[in-house]
Every structure is written in structure tokens, then in C-alpha cells.
């Protein structure tokens, strides 16, 4: 069992997938993580950290019940993943039993960033042979073997055979170096090329220059805000640089806190910081927010604490696949009473909404996708806090209201221009703060024949579903629809490919709007059919 499936690339090569390796992370190609559909050697499609020990515990229990006492269940887990609370729960359960499991600790001193906390200090003492106290793993009931040079194949094989011969829980402590064997990775002080795209093999440099990303915009702005507000602090779960807290940590190192890969602790700690007078800004990938929903709901939400979540990689992320899309965040956040959610459409709006969020004495979230924000989209005017991006000529009938959630503003504008050429009256509005639903938005919807909410989230449970409910109560004659993603685990592919496949492009939105308008002429009027429809 490979904890955090990035570790499985050599495993894939050794289990017959070398011929397909060039398709890695591409549509219909190999997954970047373990995948049960690819090989019987992949037991779990594991890509979120720290859970491998719980899986091993469960499998070992099942094998024992079936009388298969000669089998060994092995977890390969990094020291970074071992900082997660669920990993310690796994150690607690495994160490108390006598089942023959092996925990291979791949200790390279980091995940994205160097491993933080007391565990890192203890592992360092074990590496150099100068522990100040008892061996932690032995105290928890494990046989400890190591440290061993994880790059020395004969030595590593020898200790693995020794571990397999034991009829009890064993920890094999393998010391490795991140990026070992590839000079550009070894020399990369940022993260040893942890999260790189296609590169020139000789130099390690990106094959195509990267554009300024949403994360870059956030990184600059949060550092500027911190210059003016000494109460602002940054929090990260072992992802200081990837989530855009690098500039803040360089400028104010004492105001950035790294919990390790421990999102539950991260949000509960943010609650404590907020309760004691600071304004925590928690920078986290959207997909990892789910790991701490209880803390979100009851530690932050129940106490209505001024904590700002900055959700990077929201919506469709692309090549990382189903476990890394940020499709569920809107549904989860909207469940929390009192939460306010912003979805910026471009870089200026991100800067503006981040400042508004931090100035708000309540829980807030700012959500943006992976990639570059593109050119700014200027509003024609503002109504009740809503940015109106496109309006039909005054004498045209208001046919369609397109409610563009965040980055979906761009394809909505493309669709509006095409529909306008066909004499269809289209209004495009960016709510900016998509939750709670603005009364101005429901009022604007009531002036149109149909309202179509376009979002890169699960259509059934996202903002469109809530908007439909509100409009149905106040303006039942307006039909409301949502264009979004299906309630499914969407496979890996590029972001553009996935959005196109699910009708979230300008041309596809245009076609869908025309089809929905045509249905108004084919069935009785909307007063007889007040229910809205979801579409994906």
C-alpha cells in the first residue's frame, strides 16, 4: 500500500506499464496515482496522504480472519504523510496488535516543504543515532529496524527480508533523498521538483514558460495585506510554497504556521488563533478541505470565527484525476451557517475579494481554480453588489440570465456574444460573493425567461441548486437551470478537455441556452412548471 500515490511511478514501471508510461496523466492514459483498473498490483487508488496505515490495518485484520497468516501487508509512507492525524491513529491500532504488518517509513525529511513538528526532530535523532529518549515506534509496540540507506538496494532488501520474517508489527526506517538520481531535482531548493510539468530532461527547466497563476496573485496580495495588518497570519498543511504563502513566510516568518499534513489540526488551530484575536488565512487546496469538515462546521462555523479559507485548485484541476478535483467545496461550505463564499473571475477581483474577506468578522472563503486567470473582465455596471458583465440592448426582450460563478465568467461571455448575434437577449452577471444568495440576484433572475447558473462544481449540490430554490420561491415563472459537473468521479485529463467534455465552453453554453429557450415553446408555460432543472 503506497501512501500518497506519487510514490508509485517505479511500481508502475515494474508491474508491466512501462509501454504506456508516455500517456501518464493524459486523457485515457495512465493515472498519476495507483489505479485498480490498470493493474491487480494496485490495491487502492490512494492519493490523499496518511491513510495507508488504516488500510493496512483493515486488510491485515481480514487476512487474519481468513486464516492467511503467512501473508504480509506493507505500507510505504513518507515522513511528511506520517504527520497526519489518521496516520497516528493507524500506528496506535497496528502497534497494539500482533498481526504481521510492515511499515516502511520513507524518510526524506519533507513532503512539499521540510517536515515540520516534533516528529521531524525525533526522526532526525534516529537518523543520526542520538535519540534523546526512547524510540517512539518501539514504545508503541513495533519492532524498529533501521535506519537503513534507502538508496542502497542490497541493504534495503536485507532489512525487508528481516521484517518479513517477523510475526509482528515492524517499522523499517529507510532514509532517502528527495530527487535522488536526477541532478536538476537534487539542486532544486524549492521542492526538489515535486510538482513540475513537462521539462527539458537535460536542464530540468519547463518546456514552455509558465503564465502568472491565480496562486501567484494571491501570494503577492496576502503579503501586501499583512504589511498593513499585523493580526493577519497564514496557515498551511505542509504546502507553504504550492499554496502561495512563500512571500508571506519570507517577509514575516513568525506569522506563518505549518501544521504538517494535518488539516483537522490546521482548521481547529485556526479557530484558536481567531478566538485569540488574529485573523487566520488558511491556504489549502480545495480537495483537502474535505478532510476537516467537522472542524469547519463546528470549530469555525459554530463559533462564527473570522477565519478566511483560500481554496486553491477549486473546480476541475485536470491531470491529477478524481481525488484532486475541487468539485465538492461549494456544497460543503454552503452547509455551514454564516459562511460567505467569494469566487473571483479574474486577478483584480481576487485581490479585491481577498481584502474584503479578511475585513469581514465572520467565516469566509475565496475560491479559485488551477492555472492562469487570463485578462481581466470589466463589468458594465454593478447592481446590488452584482457585477453585470453583459446586457442586451434596451429594446430587446430579456431572454437569458447567465449566472457566472468565478472563472466560468469567460465562457459565459463567449456564449453571450454568440447568442446576441442571434438576436437573443442575454445578461451575464458575476455574483462575486456567491453565497449567501443575494436578493438582488433573485430579483434580476425574475426579469428573465430563463436563468442558467454556470459553475465548475457538482451541479446537483452547488450554487445553482441553491439559486434554483430561492428563485422558485420568489419568481416561480422564471425557469432555472444549472450547467456544471455530474455527481461522479471524473477521470484525469486536462482542465480544458474536461470542461469541454461536460459542456462548459462558450459554444456549448450557447447551444444549451438555445435548447432551453426552445422548450418554452414546446410545453405549457412556466407558471404550470415552476420546478427547475439541473443539467450537466
Image: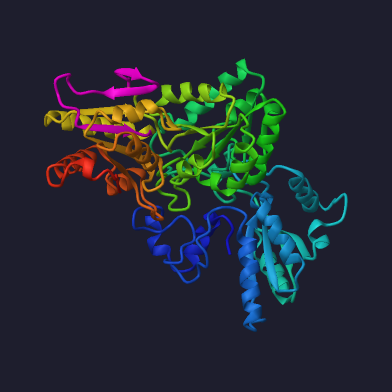
Q: Quadrant of residue 473?
A: top left
Residue 114 appears in view: no
Is 91 located above or below residue 468 in the figure?
below
Q: Quadrant of residue 69?
A: bottom right
Viewport quadrant of the N terminus: bottom right
What is the x, y in percent for residue 366? Answer: 49, 32
Residue at point 66%, 35% (across, down): 270
Is 13 located above or below residue 277 in the figure?
below
Image-based side of 479 in relation to 109, left or right: left
* 175 part of magenta stretch: no
Residue at point 43%, 46% (across, down): 327
| Render colour scheme | rainbow
What is the x, y in percent for residue 43? Answer: 52, 68
Is 117 located above or below residue 41 in the figure?
above
Residue at point 14%, 20% (across, down): 395
Image-based side of 524 in relation to 4, left or right: left
Q: What stretch is highlighted in magenta?
A: 378-405
Residue 206 appears in view: yes
Of the pair 9 and 180, the residue shown nearer to us: 9
Of the pair 388 and 191, the residue shown nearer to us: 388
> Which residue lies most toward the top here?
228
What is the x, y in percent for residue 288? Answer: 54, 46
* 391 part of magenta stretch: yes
Amino acid at each position: 500500500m503506497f501512501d500518497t500515490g506519487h510514490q508509485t511511478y517505479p511500481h508502475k514501471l515494474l508491474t508491466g506499464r512501462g509501454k504506456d508510461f508516455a500517456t501518464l496523466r493524459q486523457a485515457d492514459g495512465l493515472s498519476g496515482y495507483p489505479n485498480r483498473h490498470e493493474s491487480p498490483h494496485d490495491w487502492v487508488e490512494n492519493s490523499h496522504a496518511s491513510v495507508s496505515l488504516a488500510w493496512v490495518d483493515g486488510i491485515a485484520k481480514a487476512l487474519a480472519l481468513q486464516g492467511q497468516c503467512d501473508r504480509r501487508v506493507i505500507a510505504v509512507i513518507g515522513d511528511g504523510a506520517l504527520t497526519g492525524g489518521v496516520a497516528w491513529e493507524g500506528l496506535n491500532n497496528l502497534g497494539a496488535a500482533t498481526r504481521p504488518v510492515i511499515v516502511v517509513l520513507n524518510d526524506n525529511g519533507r513532503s512539499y516543504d521540510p517536515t515540520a513538528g516534533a516528529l521531524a526532530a525525533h526522526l532526525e535523532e534516529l537518523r543520526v543515532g542520538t535519540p534523546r529518549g526512547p524510540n517512539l515506534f518501539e514504545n508503541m509496540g513495533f519492532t524498529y529496524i533501521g535506519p537503513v540507506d534507502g538508496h542502497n538496494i542490497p541493504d534495503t532488501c536485507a532489512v525487508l527480508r528481516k521484517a518479513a520474517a517477523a510475526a509482528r508489527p515492524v517499522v523499517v526506517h529507510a532514509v532517502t533523498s528527495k530527487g535522488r538520481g536526477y541532478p536538476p531535482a537534487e539542486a532544486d531548493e524549492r521542492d526538489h521538483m515535486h510538482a513540475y510539468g513537462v521539462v527539458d530532461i537535460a536542464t530540468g527547466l519547463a518546456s514552455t514558460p509558465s503564465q502568472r497563476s491565480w496562486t501567484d496573485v494571491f501570494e503577492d496580495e496576502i503579503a501586501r495585506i499583512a504589511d498593513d495588518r499585523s493580526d493577519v497570519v497564514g496557515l498551511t498543511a505542509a504546502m507553504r510554497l504550492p499554496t502561495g504563502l512563500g512571500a508571506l513566510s519570507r517577509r514575516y516568518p513568525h506569522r506563518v504556521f505549518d501544521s504538517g499534513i494535518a488539516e483537522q489540526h490546521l482548521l481547529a488551530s485556526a479557530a484558536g488563533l481567531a478566538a485569540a484575536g488574529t485573523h487566520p488565512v488558511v491556504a489549502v487546496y480545495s480537495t483537502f478541505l474535505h478532510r476537516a469538515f467537522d472542524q469547519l462546521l463546528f470549530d469555525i462555523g459554530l463559533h462564527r470565527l473570522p477565519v478566511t479559507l483560500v481554496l486553491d485548485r477549486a473546480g476541475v484541476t485536470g491531470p491529477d484525476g478524481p481525488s484532486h478535483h475541487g468539485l465538492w467545496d461549494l456544497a460543503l461550505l454552503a452547509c455551514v451557517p454564516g459562511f460567505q463564499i467569494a469566487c473571483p473571475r479574474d486577478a483584480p477581483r481576487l485581490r479585491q475579494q481577498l481584502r474584503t474577506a479578511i475585513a469581514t468578522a465572520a467565516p469566509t472563503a475565496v475560491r479559485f481554480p488551477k492555472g492562469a486567470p487570463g485578462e481581466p473582465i470589466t463589468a458594465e455596471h454593478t447592481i446590488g453588489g452584482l457585477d453585470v458583465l453583459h446586457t442586451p440592448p434596451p429594446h430587446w426582450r430579456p431572454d437569458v440570465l447567465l449566472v457566472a460563478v468565478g472563472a466560468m465568467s469567460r465562457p459565459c461571455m463567449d456564449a453571450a456574444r454568440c447568442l446576441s448575434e442571434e438576436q437573443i437577449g442575454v445578461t451575464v452577471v458575476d455574483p462575486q460573493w456567491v453565497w449567501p444568495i443575494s436578493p438582488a440576484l433573485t430579483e434580476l433572475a425574475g426579469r428573465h425567461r430563463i436563468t442558467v447558473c454556470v459553475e465548475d462544481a457538482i451541479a446537483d449540490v452547488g450554487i445553482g441548486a441553491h439559486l434554483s430554490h430561492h428563485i422558485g420561491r420568489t419568481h416561480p415563472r422564471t425557469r432555472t437551470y444549472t450547467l456544471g459537473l455530474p455527481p461522479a468521479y471524473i477521470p484525469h485529463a486536462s482542465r480544458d478537455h474536461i470542461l469541454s467534455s461536460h459542456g462548459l465552453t462558450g459554444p456549448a453554453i450557447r447551444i444549451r441556452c438555445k435548447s432551453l429557450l426552445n422548450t418554452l415553446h414546446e410545453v405549457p408555460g412556466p407558471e404550470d412548471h415552476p420546478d427547475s432543472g439541473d443539467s450537466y
